[in-house]
Image (cartoon, rainbow, N blue to C red):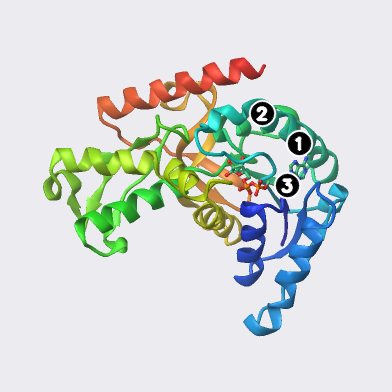
């Protein structure tokens, strides 16, 4: 399997490292800045004898090296600085997506594309439009990360093991994200039974603003360790053709009564990308929140087109 990672910044380089170190695939790491991808690739590669893997990683400024990739992960673009929302990145990142999407279309027309660049759902939509790829081949990574954040924060709050928590976070990667509380369980018990309502609200708020919290600490960029882990989970499902249900940003054509929009929903993922969009049961309140999040995303998509 060949995976290309576009952008050798914090997210891209960390992801490239995770891919080779988990023996998943050979990697081509591309960045527009001269020497950045090459330097990081050589550095990551030099650790292989210590860590004991045999995967190769090549760093380059030449995007045609992505030729015949099975998967392309798009991380190139600006990251947030303190005080910025993900939506503030829209104009500049759309231009970067546009250029990279053309290169993907030409060099690897059969690839699955995983978008990480923010604002995530709008950029995923833009990638589909510019590549012209079918909707099952392009998806955005956010829900795996948001769900992981929610689990982590809940586990800390409840002082339980992370693996005892089951949950899923849907909708837009931003403050309109929708944690599906009706499907959230702790050791098999509904969350409502183990945590008071006000505490649940606190946990949700913390999850929604976890990304901003990290931006405030870092001051010069945004999250990347957890972000790259969220992508790795998706790549694993693709590589091993697991058909696992994961929340990703997918193009909706009537599912959940939403059209012409990419939004975080549960999907079955395998070797061909999205095999199926899964319509889980939501409460009326959750469904309304999903619709509202879609509406905001559609408005942003309109700004772009
Ligand atoms: N082609 C290739 N690389 C590019 C291009 C391009 N057209 N334009 C920009 N880049 C590169 C930059 O040179 C930089 O090295 O993308 C990299 C981005 O790296 P960082 O600034 O470290 O940003 P990062 O933290 O990796 O975030 C990237 O992921 O989570 C999102 O919001 C985040 O949109 C941001 C993206």
Q: Which mark is residue 293?
A: none
User: On the image, numbered disc 1 is attached to which residue?
Assistant: 101
Local secondary structure at mark 3 = loop
Q: Residues within 10 Å of mark 2 (few under 14, many from 20)?
A: many
Q: Which residue is mark 3?
A: 111
Where's residue 242, x and y in %?
52, 58
Q: Give the CA distance from mark 3 to mark 1.
A: 11 Å
User: Helix, strand, or loop for circle 1?
Assistant: helix
Pick the quarter of the image with the N terminus: bottom right
Q: Mark 2 near mark 1, Cβ–Cβ under 8 Å?
A: yes
- Crowdedness near tag 1: few (<14), some (14–19) or many (≥20) residues, C-alpha within 10 Å: many
Residue at 53% x, 32% y: name it.
84
Give the mark nearest the N terminus, 2 or 1: 1
**Mark whose residue sits in front, 2 or 3:** 2
- Left or right: 110 as drawn, with respect to 118: right
Q: Which residue is mark 2?
A: 126
Count of marks overlaid on the render: 3
Residue labelled 3 has its Cβ within 8 Å of some atom of ligand 1? no
Circle nearer the N terminus (2, 3):
3
Q: Is residue 64 left or right of residue 158?
A: right
Q: Earlier in the sequence, mark 3 or mark 1?
A: 1
The residue positioned 81% from the left and 35% from the top of the image is 102
Please give left or right for residue 232 compared with residue 156 in the image: right
Q: Marks 2/1: CA distance? A: 9 Å
Are the residues at dot 2 and dot 3 in contact (C-beta closer than 8 Å)?
no
Say if disc 1 is inside 8 Å of ligand 1: no
Vertical relation: 174 (above or below) 41: above
Label 2 to label 3: alpha-carbon separation:
16 Å
Q: Nearer the viewer, residue 276 or 225?
A: 225
Position in image of residue 21 (x %, y %): 62, 71
* Ligand 1 placement by image quarter: top right
């Amino acid at each position: 399997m060949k995976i290309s990672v576009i952008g050798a910044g914090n997210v891209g380089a960390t992801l490239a490292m995770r891919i080779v170190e988990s023996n998943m695939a050979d990697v081509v790491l591309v960045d527009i800045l001269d020497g950045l991808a090459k330097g990081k690739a050589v550095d990551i590669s030099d650790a292989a004898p210590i860590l004991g893997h045999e995967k190769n990683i090549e760093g380059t400024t030449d995007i045609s090296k992505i030729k015949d990739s099975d998967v392309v992960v798009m991380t190139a673009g600006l990251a947030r600085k303190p005080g910025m929302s993900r939506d503030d990145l829209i104009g500049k990142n759309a231009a970067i997506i546009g250029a990279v999407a053309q290169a993907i279309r030409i060099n690897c027309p059969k690839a699955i594309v995983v978008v990480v660049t923010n604002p995530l759902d709008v950029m995923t939509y833009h990638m589909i439009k510019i590549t012209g790829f079918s909707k099952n081949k392009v998806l955005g990574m956010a829900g795996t990360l948001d769900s992981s954040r929610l689990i982590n924060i809940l586990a800390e709050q409840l002082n339980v093991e992370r693996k005892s928590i089951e949950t899923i976070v849907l909708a837009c990667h931003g403050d309109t994200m929708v944690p599906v509380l009706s499907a959230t369980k702790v050791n098999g018990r509904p969350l409502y039974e183990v945590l008071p309502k006000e505490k649940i609200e606190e946990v949700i708020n913390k999850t929604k603003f976890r990304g901003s919290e990290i931006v405030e600490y870092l001051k010069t960029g945004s999250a990347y360790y957890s972000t790259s882990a969220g992508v790795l989970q998706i790549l694993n499902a693709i590589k091993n053709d697991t058909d696992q249900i994961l929340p990703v940003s997918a193009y909706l054509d009537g599912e959940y009564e939403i059209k012409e929009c990419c939004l975080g929903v549960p999907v079955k993922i395998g070797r061909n990308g999205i095999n199926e969009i899964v319509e889980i049961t939501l409460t009326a309140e959750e469904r309304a929140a999903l619709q509202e999040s879609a509406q905001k995303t559609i408005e942003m998509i309109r700004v772009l087109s």
